[in-house]
Every structure is written in structure tokens, then in C-alpha cells.
Image (cartoon, grey):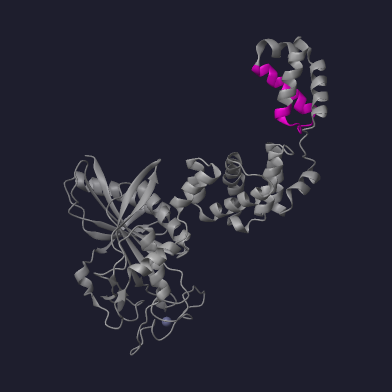
Amino acid sequence: MTYEPVIGLEVHVQLKTQSKMFCSSKNAESQVPNVHICEVCTGQPGTLPVINREAVLKSVMVGLALNCEIAEYSKFDRKNYFYPDLPKGYQISQFDHPINGKGVMEVVIGGEVRKIGITRAHLEEDAGKLVHAKGFSLVDLNRAGTPLLEIVSEPDIRSSEEAKQYLQELQNIMRYLGVSDADMEKGHLRCDANISLRKKGETGFPPYKVEVKNMNSFRAVANAIEFEITRQSELLDEGKIPDKETRGWVDDKSITVSQRSKEESQDYRYFPEPDLPVMHFTKGWLEELRKQLPELPKVRKARFMDEYGLNEKESQTLVSYKELSVYFEQVMSELAEWTKSDQKRGSMVAGWILGPFLAAINEKNLLPEQSKVTAESFAELIKLIGEGKVSNLAAKDVFAKMFVTGEDPSNILDELGLHQVSDESVILEAVKKVIAANPKGVEDAKTKGEKSFGFLVGQTMKELKGKGNPQKINELLKKELKNSNE
Ligand SMILES: [Zn+2]
């Protein structure tokens, strides 16, 4: 039987704010446990929470970026459950009036645009952490009460690849908005997946749902989904309906294991948080905020294509890495100071940044701005190539040295003696020499064409010690061969 996966994702994004969600303790990580805590986030009796304006603002920014309907009124609720890392015995979350309602996000898969619905995105506080030792456990409350935005998708995702793309795009949007570092490995972005299967062609929802937790990378999410698709299809083939349950992903074994039966919302006895006021978002305030939103990846992609003449793939790859797209623009603006930057330059710069530069920073695990190659030097290198002062090939050596030392490209060019010979008289002399020394080659070039002509080009390049401008060599060699015909 062939089945179609029905997947919805719940993503928790840790918001980057000065202080925690309901108190003035610092929202920061620390190696030392229990340093960023106070009476409120440790749940002392008699303390009262206060809403963090910055966290609310950033949540609404995400809602606007995800095309969500922003609630006019929104409130907080208590979600009651017991766990040692939750000092109050309840978590302040949002139940029936989340800040952000229905929205939609576009994901590009294999060049095709897929729309994934957003059910809601609500604000809540995080719990602390348990540190398990031999025979006992310790509680670290540095994380307790930090703001989390939970973004719930509609069950619109149909493959592990779509899930991965959705998460990457979501991460990218968070980074463009500057609301979170959204680093999955550091837990800034956590993902739970709801997975079930239906027969191909069916449109209704399956009578069960399996929730998978504990995935710490995009790869883990994709693998866990693949594992569940196989496990659930085997059960369905045997005529069984998979249990409605929560399963955990075990990364080193690449399997999911049953953790517990899934809670229903009534298990949490939600009720309105009596200590916090209802929030009111006016139309005017929302419009102001919308105007202040930073440029988002989709818009930047279109602008890069339009402004710098990049093709779709170049632009998409650049904008999917925010810092790289920023670096690209810095190089382009430096370049514009020297030359009238035409469209061809845009593709050339993109090629260098997505090629040698990206490979080099990835190898050293650096962010673009951490590399020693400044945008100014990069632009200078591109200019030298454009002016024919260095060949593309030699420029790679120059770049490699720039990356290590941070030196100026023209200095490196002098040091390494890699200046390209574009002087016509020098090239012509070499061409004449080669023609005189290779009568057979010349004969072949005239009768056999392309391949034999290439041999003469190679000989001339050798004569110029590899530094000749290839275009000029081609040009002059053709001219000389034609002359010798007459
Ligand atoms: Zn606190």
C-alpha cells in the first residue's frame, strides 16, 4: 500500500531579549547554574509577573513576517503540570487567544513554491534544566522564564524534505528579523513533529497522530520523519492503527522510542492568568511596526536579481544565508566606488563568494564577517580580475593568501609575481615565436581546427610562463595564423 505522510511541526523559538519573559532577570546563558534568577522566575510565593514588552514586540514581528492574523486582544493562560524544572507548578502560556493567528509561509522545493499554513504562534515562558548526576539530579533555573515563541504549522507538510526546507526558511526569517539566533544545536530553535499517514488520494486526516520529540538538528528531523513513515506504514500494512503517543528520537541509534501516551489539552487545566493584563494591539501600532520590519529573504532575493542581475539560484543561495548576503552587498558597494558596477559583475562576485569564499569560511567554521578578507579587499580582487591584471586561475592563489594573511590583493600579486601579461607587444612576440617553432602545429591548426589551435594557445601560455591573458592570446594567435595564410 502507498501512503502519504501528513506532517505538522511545532517549533519553539527562543527569543533574544534583554530580560526574561516576566521578570528583570537576564535572558542569557551561563556555565554557572542559577545566576540569572530572581524571586519571580524561581516561583517564590507572593511575587507577580510583568509582561516583557520587547518579547511581545518580537513575537508580533514574527507574526507579521509569517502573514499571520494578529489578534486585537490577546491574553496569557496558566498551563498546569508538575515537573522539577518548573518551579511554579504551571507554565504561563497562551491558550485560546494567541498573539498570532492563522498565517502562511512559502517554501521553495525543487524550484516550486509550496505554501505551508501556520496555525498560530503564541508566546510562553521556558522551563529550567535538569542536570542528571549519579543517583541524583540538580536544577538549573537560568533558562526558567525566558521567552519562547511556539510556532505551530498546519499539517500541510508532505515529506521529510519539505519539513527540512520549512525549518530552514523559518530559521532564516528569525535571523533576518533579528529576534533569535535560531541555532538548533544550541536549543534556540526546537522542533517537535506530528506525523501520521493516510492512503494516497485520501484527503481527510488519519485517526491517530504520533508526536516525535528530541530532534537537535535539521538532519535529525528529516531522519526521524523517515523512520516514522517506515514504522507506521508497516503497522498499517498489518491492519493495525499506530498508537496515539509521544515518541523520542534517539540520534545515535536513528530510531524513535515510545515515551508516553499523548496528553490532551484538558490534562493541563488551562485557565486565564489572573496576574497579567489582557494585551491590546491597535491597527495603527501594527501598521507602524509593519513599516519597520527589516527586509525579509523573499524580498531580498527579488531585489538582488533585479539590482545585481543575479540568476534565481545565485540569489536564493545568497539570501538563504543572511550574513553572506550582507557581505555580498558590502563587496558590491565597495566595487561600485571604483567602477560602474554592471550586471555581469554581480554574477562574478556571487560566483566568488559562493565558491572559494564560502568553502574557505566553512572549512574554518567562520562567519563571513569574521574572515580576514575585508569587503574592500574582495572588491579590489574582483576589480583586478576585471581589468585583466590577474587571470581567474591566479586570482584563486591570491585569494587563498588573502584569506590566510588578510593582505591587500595587489601586494600579494606583487609578492607572488602573478601579474597577468596583457601587454599586446609581449604576447605578440610570444605568439610569433610559437608559430615559428611549430610548423606542424600551425598546419594542423589550419586544417584540423579547434583542438590543434588549443595546442598553440597552450604553447604560447607556456612561453609566457602561464601569465598571459588567455583572451589576448586567442585573439592575437588567430590574427597571426590568418596573416600567415595570405
Ligand atoms: Zn527572574
| 464 on left or right of 110 | right
Considering the whole magenta stretch, tell me its main secondary structure: helix
Vertical relation: 228 (above or below) 440? below
Residue 131 spot, x, y in % from top left:
42, 73
Total marks drawn?
0
Quadrant field for ligand 1: bottom left
**Residue at image point 31% right, 65% down:** 70
| 362 on left or right of 386 | left
Q: What range is drawn magenta here?
A: 450-472
**Quick check: can you spot residue 7?**
yes
**Residue 64 belongs to magenta span:** no
Vertical relation: 40 (above or below) 401? below
- In the rendered image, the residue lying farthest to the front is 284
**Residue at image point 74% right, 15% down:** 481
**Quick check: can you spot residue 254?**
no
| 143 on left or right of 31 | left
Quadrant where the C terminus is found in the figure:
top right
Q: Nearer the viewer, residue 196 or 378?
A: 378
Quarter location, residue 448: top right
Vertical relation: 388 (above or below) 33? above
Quarter location, residue 439: top right
| 197 on left or right of 112 | left
Residue 393 spot, x, y in % from top left:
68, 37
Q: Nearer the viewer, residue 264 or 229?
A: 264
Residue 384 spot, x, y in % from top left:
71, 42
Residue 241 spot, x, y in % from top left:
18, 51
- In the rendered image, the residue lying farthest to the bottom is 46
Q: Nearer the viewer, residue 103 or 8?
A: 103
Quarter location, residue 454: top right
Quadrant where the N terminus is found in the figure:
top left
